[in-house]
Amino acid sequence: MYVEVVPNRNSRPAILLREGWREGQKVRKRTLANLTDWPAEQVEALRRVLKGEGLGAPAAALTIERSLPHGHVEAILGTVRALGLERGIAPQRSAARDLVVAMVVARLIDPGSKLATTRSWQTTTLAEELGVGEADEDDLYAALDWLVARQARIEAKLAQAHLHEGCLVLYDVSSSYYTGSHCALAQFGHSRDGKPGFPQIVYGLLCNAEGCPVAVEVFEGNTADPATLRVQIEKLTRRFGLTRVVLVGDRGMLTDARIDQALKPAGLDWISALRGPAIQRLANEGTLQLSLFDEQDLAEITSPAFPGERLIACRNPWLAEERARKREELIRATEKLLVKVVAATQRSRRPLRGRAEIGLRVGRILNRYKVGKYFRLSITETTFVYERHKERIARDAAVDGLYVIRTSVPEPEMGAAETVRAYKDLARVEQAFRSLKSVDVKIRPIYHRRTDRVRAHVFLCMLAYYVEWHMRRRLAPLLFDDDDKASAAALWSSVVAKAQRSPAATVKARRKRTPDGLPVHSFSTLLAELGTRTRNRCRLTTDPETPTFLQLAEPTPLQQRALELLGLFPVRAPAKG
């Protein structure tokens, strides 16, 4: 039994005497009495009796020798153990496994270098929980070497838990810049971070249909997206033993060449989308017409250019307006700069001269906004004239808001709407990349030089996001995340239309409060709030020779609710000192 304070939105908090117990994986509780009208001193006396304390003044008899943040460690490490991730990393406990788990937890609490991680051992209870307080950065490097050697086995276990025959597999690629200069993986390539002056690494992430990460692979920084596909297919078919899955990838990933040379020989189905030029060709040949969307926003079409494939054409009016608006803004911004070049060729003092000089300046402008195809240019030794290419603008405007999903999955197995939804689920991988790169896990900056250490670092970050993904699902009622997917889906008039949030999520975001009055958090701020629950090492003042013991701070209503959602409340008693 325990005393719980439950906040009320429009009245004073309710003070309840409750009993908690566990049924399987669920925590149950019931209210035994309402103590709201009791005097505060009586409530406090009952609380102390239930905790086994005397009724004297315990504060005068106790000395707190050390107080460390504990709640976030309790939540993350408890989730790691509830997921069975420790045994997934290695069946038997070892120093290396404890260090890897410690690095996974630390990555979510305060991501940093391995040296910084060892410096943080004394700032939380993490090192005490796992017994790694004496480990230094060299021990962490050795644990990384141990981890990367086990990566294939760990990924196979994750795949066994989250993938199955006939399932959807989401795959996408991202990159992160590298600030060092001694790693063979770090090469110059297309920078998704906006850091073209730095070398980078490329990594591909495999997720299940819900966005749960299963495997990650690191490539050299100049590797093109489609070139990463063959490794993933081998991983799915040979290492994971899957013979029939549907691979979902974007239009830049699943190109015609990769479909013919990699997917088809492996016997795998796919879902992707056509690129802009292919959509334009379908429109020019009359296969794709706007009349298809007079009564609906998607329609299945066929084309001899894509034999044996289903093409699902979609038109989103909101997207059409947005693309038209953005194109017009970019054209106007480019025109403002081109006018200056025209003026430079016509000024009386030191006019701009030379076809090469004028062309170089114009090229820089056109490369800035990437809309050079919408202009006709005329450059001579002394003049520069431009005008809008109205025919090309009109031709692109005709397909604004149109996109075409392509798939090899037969219609009886997956309907048109379901196929479109599966392709849109790639946004879940993008969410994973946002968390990995900048929001929570922060894969950057990358400090390691050896290629195996870089691979281990990326894999470690994926494992941290794996834990975060599961925690987010359970903590959704306390986060800004939508925790009423069924209501949101009911509001989604069409799979082509923009997705809607549920009314409950909209109200939660506007009020910044949950229905029971608790503050709504982001994932990182909720962890910070949990971290204020401390674990204190105490000693009896009256008898200094007695052993110390550990005492947890009482959880706040928010902390208690978070631990309940994670299945960790009532929490276990702390270990004796």
Image (cartoon, helix red, strand yellow):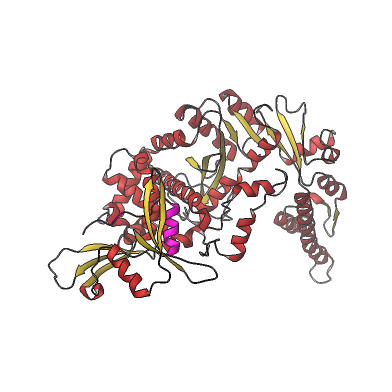
Q: As rendered, which of 230 and 358 lies closer to the eye? A: 230
Q: Quadrant of residue 334?
A: bottom right
User: Which residue is found at the position 75% from the left and 58% from the top?
Assistant: 357
Q: Is residue 109 above or below residue 286?
A: below
| Residue 9: x %, y % from top left | 54, 68
Q: As rendered, which of 273 and 544 lies closer to the eye? A: 544
User: Which residue is found at the position 46% from the left and 56% from the top?
Assistant: 445
Q: Quadrant of residue 395?
A: top right
| Residue 420: x %, y % from top left | 68, 39
- Specify whether 153 is left or right of 170: left
User: Which residue is found at the position 85% from the left and 34% from the top?
Assistant: 286
Q: Is residue 98 above or below residue 520?
A: above
Badge count = 0
Whether residue 409 is visible to the viewer of this picture, yes or no, is yes
Q: As rendered, which of 131 and 560 lies closer to the eye? A: 560
| Residue 77: x %, y % from top left | 37, 51
| Magenta extent | 557-577
User: Which residue is found at the position 22% from the left and 71% from the top?
Assistant: 62
Answer whether residue 363 is magenta in the image. no
Which quadrant holds the C terminus? bottom left
Whether residue 111 is visible to the viewer of this picture, yes or no, is no
Q: Is residue 124 above or below residue 427?
A: below
Answer whether residue 571 is magenta in the image. yes
Which quadrant holds the N terminus? bottom left
**Furthest-left residue in view?**
545
